[in-house]
Image (tube, rainbow, N blue to C red):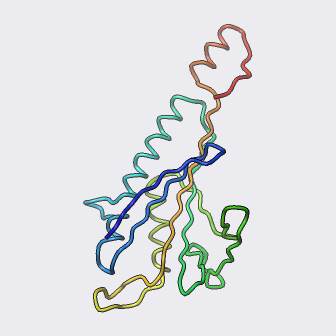
Amino acid sequence: MLSTIAITKDKNSKHYTTLLTYGQTGSGKTFTVFGDKNDPGIVPRLLIALFEKISTLRQEFAANDYHVEVSMLEIYNEKVRDLLRPRNGGFVKVREVGEYFRVLNLTTVVVHSREEVEQVAAEGSKKRSIASTNKNEKSSRAHTIFNIRSIIRFVQKIKEKKELASNGLKSCSSI
């Protein structure tokens, strides 16, 4: 089994991280990514760190301006299905937009905790295409993409805001 993480930055200073697992049926890809309650995988560990960081930033900054959203899709027999949308079988269209590909009308769910993310992932996983193989009775026959998007805007440090207010100054700076 191969697992790799790539972190890239685009021209707009946005960071993208991709976790790719590749391997034979039964080699541990799903366990590596999601783990279980006693041994969390990469995604639960990432979520713990993400929500801890958001909590810290909310305390340090006047940061009500953040949200985390997730989406989940699968590619099976050259068709793309939205695993969070039950209607019409969840089939969606993919379009090339500039140098990127966009999935049209993909369902996104705003989440506020690691537990909510795990609940959404569990619901989407129930809709994955599975079939039995010689090695695994419930093998996924598709490629699954689980997307976590976090948007955090830093407005102004609370401390700095209080200091400016006590000095009678108005602030127009942002971080």
Q: Quadrant of the N terminus?
A: bottom left
Q: In x, y percent, where is residue 66?
A: 60, 44
Q: Who's the residue at 68% across and 61% down the image? A: 99
Q: Who's the residue at 53% across and 58% down the image? A: 148
Q: In x, y percent, where is residue 39?
A: 26, 60
Q: Is residue 172 above or below residue 131?
A: above
Nearer to the camera, 15 or 117: 15
Q: Is residue 74 above or below residue 66?
A: below
Would you identify the image quadrant in which residue 27 lies?
bottom left
The answer to whether residue 156 is left or right of residue 117 is right
Nearer to the camera, 164 or 93: 93
Q: In x, y percent, where is residue 75?
A: 54, 79
In the image as oriented, which residue stretches furthest toward the top?
A: 167
In the image as oriented, which residue stretches furthest toward the left?
A: 38
The answer to whether residue 131 is left or right of residue 161 is left
Nearer to the camera, 76 or 43: 76
The answer to whether residue 123 is left or right of residue 87 is left
Q: Is residue 48 above or below residue 138?
A: above
Q: How many marks?
A: 0
Q: Is residue 142 above or below residue 118?
A: below
Q: Who's the residue at 35% across and 75% down the image? A: 23
Would you identify the image quadrant in which residue 122 lies?
bottom left
Q: Quadrant of the C terminus?
A: top right
Q: In x, y percent, where is residue 56?
A: 47, 35
